[in-house]
Amino acid sequence: MREDKDRGSKWMIDHHGDSILRLGGVTNIRAWRAAQTTLVQPGQSPDGLLEVFLADEQTPVPFLVEVSTYPQQRSNEQVLRDVMMVFLDRHVVPEVITLVLHPKGQYCLTGTHEQASQLGWTRFTTNWRVVELWTVPAEELLAANDVGLMPWVPLTRFDGAPEPILQMCSERIEREAPPEEKDTLFAVAQIMTRLRYNNVGLMALFGGKKMFTDSPLIQELFAEKLIELIVEELTERFGGVPSDITTVLLGIVDEDRLKSLVKWACHCPDLEAFRSRLMS
């Protein structure tokens, strides 16, 4: 579930980053684009870095976007680290928005964090915008002319049973989403609904299990997990995996072929035999 949420959130940032910015109160967007986050160490990248062209600015404004499932103290240090990385790479301090999906416990993210040196001579103070989705009225998102907001609606504030609200979200996606994005928007809406409700029946409002597993987003996630299994098995058996093998593996999305390669990784006599099967 966490991997689904992470992948779904990153897809939303890359494809509907302007929708998330609007959740954070940014309304004067002329244009935007997802920026590459090669500036960071592997496994330490922010959820998203956007370059945003605002109506009253001549140059693009960098926005860091973090999506946190629950309010957690570690999010504070994560924001500070990401801000410092962007500053070192671009020599500008980015704007930051943290989108918190669901409440848990008593802890709340305040959007303020201070980190001091051992002797207290040096201090970093960071302030940023936090959006708690469960405090956002669902009516505001449904009233907006923005289909990219629909997958977030299941986590927002509304009265009564969830079915009518989720049905409206589903109808908006069906009616307004670009054809190439529709399946993925339905899949992300299912992911967000599962985070709040333990009700399989609600998933049917967004196409159910088949829509979920058929979406390109989930197929990519399945492929990534199978590739990880292959690399782990080959590393354990042969001490490492050459870069030419990993490069070819990363280009495969066919689930059946990857499952076959998982089995071969467990039984092949050596790396050359695996490479031969992979390249055939």
Image (spheres, grey):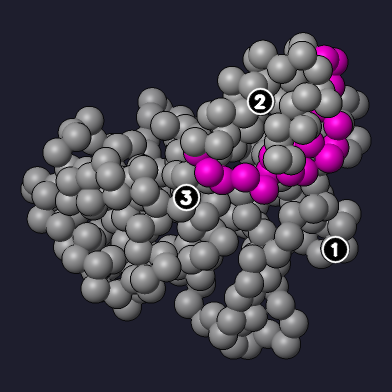
Q: Residue 247 lies in magenta, yes or no? A: yes
Counting other residues with Cα less than 10 Å from the Cα at mark 2, is it few (<14), some (14-19), or many (20 or more)?
A: many
Q: Residue 137 lies in magenta, yes or no? A: no
- The amino acid type found where label 1 is placed reads Arg
Q: Which residue is mark 1?
A: 90
Image location (x, y in percent) of residue 207: 23, 51
Q: Is 173 positioned to the left or the right of 94 in the image?
A: left
| Snapshot quadrant of residue 116 | top right
Compare residues 204 and 159 and report the one nearer the observer.
204
The numbered dot on residue 118 is: none
| Snapshot quadrant of residue 183 | bottom left
Counting other residues with Cα less than 10 Å from the Cα at mark 1, is it few (<14), some (14-19), or many (20 or more)?
A: few
Q: Which residue is mark 3?
A: 217
Image location (x, y in percent) of residue 143: 25, 73
Secondary element type, mark 3 = helix
What residue is shown at x 52% (from left), y 82% (from top)?
28
| Snapshot quadrant of residue 170 | bottom left
Q: Which residue is mark 2?
A: 230
Highlighted magenta segment, given as a residue range = 238-255
Quarter of the figure with the N terminus: top left
What residue is shown at x 54% (from left), y 59% (from top)?
13
Disc number lying in front (1 or 3): 3
Image location (x, y in percent) of residue 112: 61, 45
Q: Is 204 positioned to the left or the right of 91 in the image?
A: left
Mark 2–mark 3 distance (CA, rounded to whole Å): 20 Å
What residue is shown at x 28% (from left), y 66% (from top)?
173
Secondary element type, mark 2 = helix
- The amino acid type found where label 3 is placed reads Leu
User: Can residue 262 be seen in this snapshot?
Assistant: yes
Mark 1–mark 3 distance (CA, rounded to whole Å): 30 Å
What residue is shown at x 86% (from left), y 32% (from top)?
242
